[in-house]
Amino acid sequence: MGRSRVRASVYVSVDVEADGPIPGPFSMLSFGAAVAGRQDADGYVAADPEAVTFYRELRPISGEFVPEALAVSGLDRERLLVEGAQPEAALREFTAWVREASRGGQPVMCGYPAAYDWTFLYWYLMRFTGESPFGHSGCLDMKTLYATKARLPLRAVAKRTMPAGLLSRRPHTHHALDDAIEQAELFNNLMAWPGV
């Protein structure tokens, strides 16, 4: 396939707040997403991460939770049992949002690190909608991207070891939308960084 026929990737930064280590026994309580940018054969174009966003708080799907995990987000499970969105409705809205936001390109979920967020997001998408707008493998881990560009072993990488100029100036609040926007800025900086 020639470079001119490469379909664009649209990178969507996603952050998840959950009340335990795995989906199913535990619940995704909120998730936020922000379009970070678009890449095609001509290169990467960053987007304003605040311009196209999505956020939902969800009704828990089980009675189990890990108090320490719940404390990280500060979300109130009792409130979410009453006010949280039904997962099926929220995930269908999210799928439609992703498709609209990535029109003309292929959506790619990105996160830092992506493994935890992807595990919950993909499980919820498949469980409650039967499909994923990202496919089964449309996921990019920013930690791996940095490790590759910095020529470091993955386990040597942490945000505190990154050059300050790569990091977002936004605080990491553990509010899923705030953190998705923060991560989108990190992603944009990583895409522009030539590495070492």
Image (cartoon, rainbow, N blue to C red):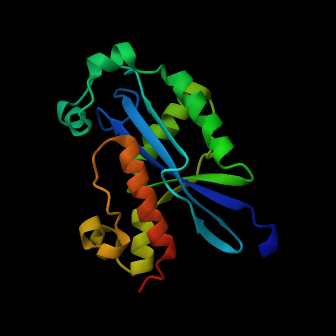
Report the residue at 75% width, 53% height from top.
Answer: 104
Q: Is residue 179 above or below residue 162?
A: above
Residue 91 image-quadrant placement: top right
Coordinates of residue 16 in the picture (x, y in percent):
39, 41
* Quadrant including the N terminus: bottom right
Q: How many marks?
A: 0
Coordinates of residue 177 in the picture (x, y in percent):
41, 43
Left of 138 or right of it: where is 64?
left
Q: Is residue 184 above or below residue 19?
A: below
Left of 183 or right of it: where is 162?
left
Coordinates of residue 73 in the picture (x, y in percent):
26, 37
Report the residue at 49% width, 35% height from top.
Answer: 123
Q: Nearer the viewer, residue 107 or 130?
A: 107
Report the residue at 65% width, 59% height from top.
Answer: 9
Coordinates of residue 66 in the picture (x, y in percent):
22, 31
Report the residue at 46% width, 21% height from top.
Answer: 85
Q: Nearer the viewer, residue 55 or 72?
A: 55
Q: Residue furthest bottom?
A: 196
Q: Is residue 34 above or below residue 184?
A: above
* Quadrant including the C terminus: bottom left
Tell me, yes or no, if residue 133 can be seen here. yes
Tell me, yes or no, if residue 158 can be seen here. no
